[in-house]
Image (cartoon, helix red, strand yellow):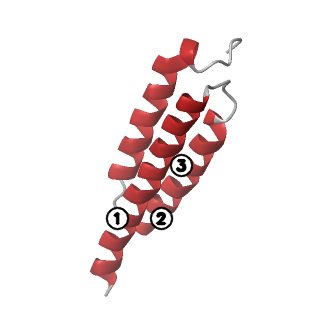
């Protein structure tokens, strides 16, 4: 991508967020969940490369926080099966 601005790449960024959600929800075991943790970390780093306004930055931060919540819920779900 030549233009690393949030506004011109919004569709791409939303696709990345949508895929991240699918990666988390598709985890069937602890190993896949660890991969999802890494994936979320990579997404968080990736979106920092885009030039963003404060409002866009807040949106991205909230989205990553929601992904981390999803991971915690999924992690609890796996821990219930172990115990």
Q: CA distance from mark 2 to mark 3?
A: 15 Å
Which residue lies under the disc numbered 3? Answer: 40
The quadrant holding residue 44 is top right
Task: Compare residues 5 and 29 and report the one nearer the observer.
Answer: 5
Which residue lies under the disc numbered 2? Answer: 31
Disc 2 vs disc 3: Cβ atoms closer than 8 Å? no
> Is 34 left, or right, of 71 in this rendering?
right
Looking at the image, which residue is at 46% across and 56% down? 68
Name the quarter where the C terminus is drawn.
bottom left
Which residue lies under the disc numbered 1? Answer: 73
Q: CA distance from mark 1 to mark 2?
A: 15 Å
Indicate whether 22 appears above or below 7. Answer: below
Indicate whether 58 appears above or below 66. Answer: above
Label 1: which secondary element: helix
Q: Position of residue 37 (x, y in %)?
A: 52, 57
Looking at the image, which residue is at 28% across and 79% down? 81
- Tell me if residue 26 can be seen: no
Indicate whether 38 appears above or below 8. Answer: below
Label 2: which secondary element: helix
Disc 1 vs disc 3: Cβ atoms closer than 8 Å? no
Mark 1 neighbour density, 10 Å: few (under 14) some (14–19) many (20 or more): few
Name the quarter where the N terminus is drawn.
top right
Instruction: State which tag comes first along the sequence, 2 or 3.
Output: 2
In this rendering, the label closer to the viewer, 2 or 3: 3
Query: How many callouts does the rendering have?
Result: 3
Looking at the image, which residue is at 45% across and 35% down? 17
């Amino acid at each position: 991508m030549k233009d690393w601005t949030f506004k011109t790449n919004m569709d791409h960024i939303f696709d990345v967020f949508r895929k991240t959600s699918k990666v988390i929800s598709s985890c069937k075991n602890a190993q896949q969940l660890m991969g999802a943790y890494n994936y979320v970390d990579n997404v968080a780093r990736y979106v920092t490369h885009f030039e963003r306004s404060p409002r866009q930055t807040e949106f991205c931060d909230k989205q990553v926080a929601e992904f981390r919540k999803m991971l915690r819920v999924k992690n609890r779900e796996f821990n219930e099966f172990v115990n």
